Amino acid sequence: MRNLVILIGLTLSLQGCFVAGAAAGAAGAVAVYDHRKLESIFKDQTITKQISDKIMANHALSENTHIEVTTCNQVVLLTGETNTPEQRQQAEDIARGTADVTKVYNELAIRGATSSLTRTSDSWITAKIKTEMLATKDLESGTIKVVTENGAVYLMGIVSREQADMAVDIARKVSGVQKVVKIFKYTN
């Protein structure tokens, strides 16, 4: 178990963008391995914090939901679960109304929140993917953000098509992955 905690902590410290759990309180790590300019990293952190704070301040969204906010290069990904379509839309509206956000991907499912066992499995899947990416020659894994929600893997970042294909191939091969969703901006 100790090794799992260390592996997950290491993997989170290598993430290229910023993530926070709005329903569980702000959490996440900024990359030591992130190749972007500090200005971009801080901008993503600020966006994530602003959206997470607004969601936490909204009573309808902060209770009985599980909403994760991930920002990468000013692109926001909302994952998790809400109980109603109205809550899903409220979260999206908050994200879209936040300064400096260029695009919002709303992947919130309308159902009860996932269990802690499912979230632990998702963290393990993310850790396995990031570990495989780090071990893959010629893959610049520090430029790719990996988010896993209920077995669905979301890949974000600014990469070449070749780098994207390598990352997707790795993610698809990891046990427990249900689907892989690309949210890349391509350099070529």
Image (cartoon, rainbow, N blue to C red):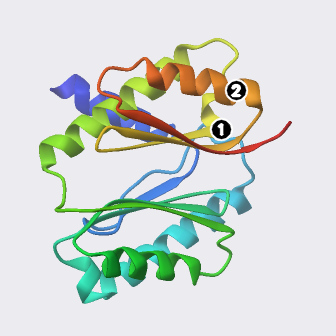
**129 in relation to 67, above or below:** above
Residue found 64% across the figure and 57% down from its top: 41
**57 in relation to 89, above or below:** below
> Number of marks in the image?
2
Q: Secondary structure at mark 1?
A: helix
| Type of amino acid under label 2 | Gln
Quarter in which the N terminus is drawn: top left
To which quarter of the image does residue 117 belong?
top left
Q: Nearer the viewer, residue 84 or 24?
A: 84
Residue found 41% across the figure and 83% down from its top: 54
Reading the image, the residue beneath label 1 is 143
Give how far apart the Cα atoms at labels 2 and 1 are: 10 Å
The nearer-to-camera label among 2 and 1 is 2
Quarter in which the C terminus is drawn: top right
To which quarter of the image does residue 25 belong?
bottom left
Residue 166 coordinates in the image, percent (x, y) = 63, 21
Q: Residues within 10 Å of mark 2 (few under 14, many from 20)?
A: some
Q: Secondary structure at mark 2?
A: helix
Residue farthest right in this picture? 188
| Type of amino acid under label 1 | Thr
**19 in relation to 145, above or below:** below
Reading the image, the residue beneath label 2 is 163
Residue found 34% across the figure and 69% down from its top: 22
